[in-house]
Image: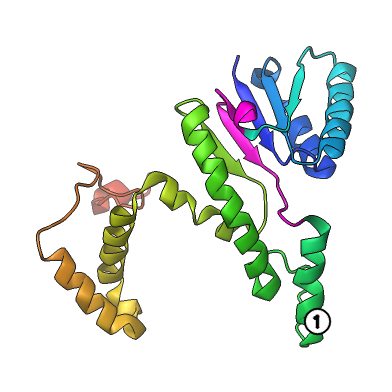
Amino acid sequence: MFKIAFIGAGSLGFTRKLLADLLTVPEFNDVEVAFTDINRKNLEMVEKICQRDIKANGLKIKIISTKSRRNAVKDAKYVINTVRIGGLEGFQADVDIPLKYGVDQCVGNTLCAGGIMYGQRGIAAILGFCKDIRENAAKDCLFLNYSNPNAMMMDPLVGAVCNPPEIWQMTDEMLVAEAKWLPQYKKAIAEARKRLSSGKLLPVKEGYKGAARVEVKSRPTLKLKI
């Protein structure tokens, strides 16, 4: 048995559908499920509805709901984020204020002015989630983000893996490696090259060849066999 925790579980649409999908997998029919949300009323409502769904499908899973995020993620193997920081009030500002300036974003939850501000609200929360997961969740816990703006929300996870000096060194390496496509950063790239050539480098993962490496194949290997 393993544990799955939902952060922001008070979202009925996301939480109920996600949990229903998970429970169609036989290996997930005997898991521990934890819900957490800052809105007690929504949390209790979603718990009751999801527990009813579980019972209707003949499963014996008992949902544990709590306003304590740290308790929810304790020993969890998977943590799923479904939060919307700011709720409908924040969403209204994301859409209405840009409209005053002629910027019609339709939804405004991934890009443009609304998406950027939505991301700023969420990123601060994500950092707290990462801290709780690192301190309380299972050692091999996998964090899955289901909140927009998805790409921006994932940016701080670099900080959950690397410390600031490692991030700077990684950025220097990327700037130098991609210099031919980044003419606008000519000065920064020159400075990055200087830092990398200083010899004062942090240790990195040994023997790593790269996930996107291209395996060299001979012509006979590539030849179609009819």
- Quarter of the N terminus within the rendering: top right
Say if 48 sits above or below 154 in the image. above
- Name the side, left or right, on which 35 lies relative to 42: left
Residue 104 visible to an observer of this rendering: no
Q: Find the residue positioned furthest to the bottom.
A: 102
Q: Residue at x 60, y 31 (%)?
A: 70
Three-letter amino acid code of the residue under disc 1: Leu
Front in this rendered view, residue 46 or 24: 46
Residue 145 visible to an observer of this rendering: yes
Say if 91 sits above or below 34 in the image. below
Residue 193 in picture, x, y percent from top left: 18, 71
- Colouring: rainbow
Q: Residue at x 76, y 16 (%)?
A: 61
- Name the side, left or right, on which 18 lies relative to 213: right
Is residue 195 a member of the stretch shown in magenta?
no
Q: Quadrant of residue 63?
A: top right
The total of numbered circles placed on residues is 1
Q: Residue at x 52, y 28 (%)?
A: 136
Q: Return the residue at label 1.
A: 99
Determine whether the residue tagged by mark 1 lies in a helix, strand or loop: helix
Is residue 85 a member of the stretch shown in magenta?
yes
Q: Residue at x 45, y 27 (%)?
A: 139
- Quarter of the C terminus within the rendering: top left
Q: Which residues are magenta?
A: 70-86
Q: Residues within 10 Å of mark 1 (few under 14, many from 20)?
A: few
Residue 222 in picture, x, y percent from top left: 32, 50
Front in this rendered view, residue 175 or 95: 95
- Name the side, left or right, on which 45 lies relative to 118: right
- Name the side, left or right, on which 39 lies relative to 73: right
Front in this rendered view, residue 42 or 67: 67
Residue 106 in picture, x, y percent from top left: 80, 72
